[in-house]
Image (spheres, coloured by chain):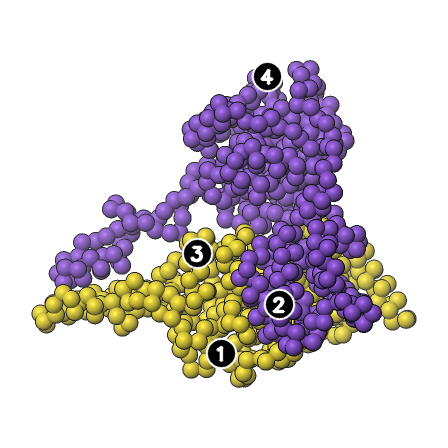
Chain colours: A purple, B yellow
Amino acid sequence: MTAGPSDDKRDENTLAEGDVKTDEQHVAPNFFVGEADGGRLADNIMHFARVLRRAGLPVGPGKVLEAVKAVSAVGVSSRKDFYWTLHAVFVNRRDQREVFDQAFHFFWRNPNLLEKMMGMMLPSTKMDEAAAPPKDEMSRRVADALAGDKPGDEQDEASEPDEDLIEMDATLTFSRDEVLSEKDFEKMSSAELAEARSAIQKLTLPIRQVPNRRFQPHPQGRRVDMRATLREAARFGGDLAALKRRKHTRRPPPLVVLCDISGSMDRYARMLLHFMHALTNDRDRVHTFLFGTRLTNITRYLRYKDPDAAVDTISEAVEDWSGGTRIGHALHDFNVNWSRRVLGQGAVVILITDGLDREGAEGVAEEMERLHKSCRRLIWLNPLLRYDAYEPRAAGARAMMPHVDEFRAVHNLGSLAELAEALGKDASLSRREMARWRAAAA
Amino acid sequence: MTNSLPKNVDDTMTLLGEGNYVADRSLATALFLSLELKRPLFLEGEAGVGKTEIAKVLSNTLGRDLIRLQCYEGLDVSAAVYEWNYARQMLEIRMAEASGGADRQTLESELFSERFLTKRPILRALEPHAGGPPVLLIDELDRTDEPFEAFLLEVLSDYQVTVPEMGTVKAETPPLVIITSNRTREIHDAIKRRCFYYWVDYPNAEREFEILKIKAPNASEDLSRQIVAFVQKIRSLDLFKLPGVAETIDWAQALTQLDRLTLDPDTINDTLGTLLKYQDDIAKIQGSEAARILDEVKAEMSQKESV
């Protein structure tokens, strides 16, 4: 929704600017000349593609050839057409448009400058373009890398919240501030790695496989597979036709994990991350989000095969470690921006949070209802029970309880194995439990 | 109407204009590229912004057949490409038995020949057509699953499909392929890489007004302007589902049917269901909020007039 009409205007403005510069400096690209300068234009397109690649767009050599073809098909008589021609070739996803836009306006203003400034491109365009979105992940990544490492807030893991603090959590004194900090997780030991693997192998999620609309051959299947039957019949000259059968295949539904990483969940953050990492690499169609005061999609980072590398990148990418919780806000963000994209095919949602909300559960009920209506099954895992007689009295928990299909609670979640066990509990047992939880929250 | 393929971006604009489609120049550029370089055009955008319409307009103005493949979960080769006509095949076997002549080899090769093939959209799109290569619309690709996407790779890059019993069928002239997606999930990069990508956005006020002039010609100019201004304002609000162009057109037509010449709060409340499709959203806008937005719209419009 950022590009479009306003873009058109900007194009024309920069077009005017670019032209003036061409006359004055004699260094700007004269790509308006067209065919006569084909070689140079091709070079420039190649350089431009390299810039895009550096900025994180998946631009391969094939794309460059295609871009050159496309440009010669459209011609280079107007800057606007040129823009949209390259756009059609290089941009693959909507969220790449902003990066493309920045790169285009910077590069095609004066590509000669670029050789020197390659590395500095994104930060300087950011200064150029006041309209650049503050949350653009890619720009921020490149910008961060170039600006040097900021000393992050030293949130020492050693000062782990002790018993008292947790008790206080349960009595609703939790952080009111949005703490922005980077997190420094210790590396996984090989013993832990082994434990994680075995826990994941044993893990049975409370999610049943759902029948698919595809078929597989099966001797006891309920449907006749005409195609296979006929082939078989033809093989024997058509005298005998033994019926071949098939049945619907089953596959696990897509899974979306929403995990709370606020201060009160701090001590579990590392373990949960490893859990999510293992889950993401174990099956397809898993999407993972973290939220504290804001929502971050970490699915892409979790695709790194090495768990430590994945966790390291996440700790850099996520900004609201151990801060407050705004459950309603984060869920709203998810509902508006992501639910249609990731809940499409009957996804199951696992929500991991303690239900302690710093904003007095404002908007939590509405957003939970919306989330519940958009997914196949909503499972809430609460890892922060201190004692058996837990009652969901906190405003956030009470607002959430009516809208979840299953509530899974763990006392003092210590290891991946415990987490796996909690998730693998028999579902029929939890149905009765669920009624009890709902009554308690009412 | 029969036109030849456009020669440049301006031609493409004219072509879309002839088909009563009001397009951005950026869209025309992407469409021209896809026609010129014979690559599929991948259109992504919210529901109701006119993605499917482009394919229809293209087939109308170019006088090509439109072949539509509506995607759904579990779409497989037998529904998308071809299926053998089992009844006829069985009949053939019986007849061969009755005459007693056919040996195994001939029967097998006979049974799996083109005579017994039921052609589905993709195979039909690859065949030669009288009016030139057809327009193949693969609608809502995000509704199907990954295996079907993977199957499409062969079709989209080489314009050919393989029928194991018969061999490979290749299009002499590739069809014009339009793929649409509502982005209910991400389509794999491998597909996108083979296409020209375009994100269809909501139109700006000016363009939306032009669209209304064409699609709802009976609405008075004042009404159309008010509708457009109102809808544009609503799109900036925090709603679960923003109204698309299709909804704007529906609303304009509904108001025309009700013989309204201008908007008033009561009418808006009564007809809001054509514009917003979620109860939460309707509840949010209905009543005082609608009246407030309408006041803003009217104030802005009178300001413009006085200038």
Residue farthest toward the right in the current orientation of the protein: B306
Q: Nearer the viewer's eye, disc 4 or disc 1?
A: 1
Q: Is residue A55 left or right of residue A220?
A: right
- Which amino acid lies under the numbered mark 3 shown in the image of this protein? Ala
Q: Secondary structure at mark 2?
A: helix
The chain carrying label 2 is A
- Under tag 1, what secondary structure? loop
Residue at x 62%, y 78% (from the top left corner): B8
Q: Position of residue A253 (x, y in %)?
A: 46, 43
Res. B14 image quadrant: bottom right
For badge 2, the amino acid type reads Ala
Q: Is residue A236 visible?
A: yes
State how many labels appear: 4
In this picture, residue B57 sits left or right of residue B293: left
User: What is the number of the mark on residue B150?
Assistant: 3
Q: Which residue is mark 2?
A: A42
Tag 3–tag 4 contact (CB < 8 Å): no
Gap between marks 4 and 1 measured at Cα: 71 Å
Crowding near the residue tagged with mark 3, few <14, some 14–19, many ≥20 C-alpha atoms within 10 Å: few
Q: CA distance from mark 1 to mark 2?
A: 35 Å
Residue A310 is situated, as x and y percent measured from the top left of the image, at 57, 36
- Amino acid type shown at disc 4: Tyr
Instruction: Give the left or right position of residue B1, taking residue B113 as reference.
Output: right
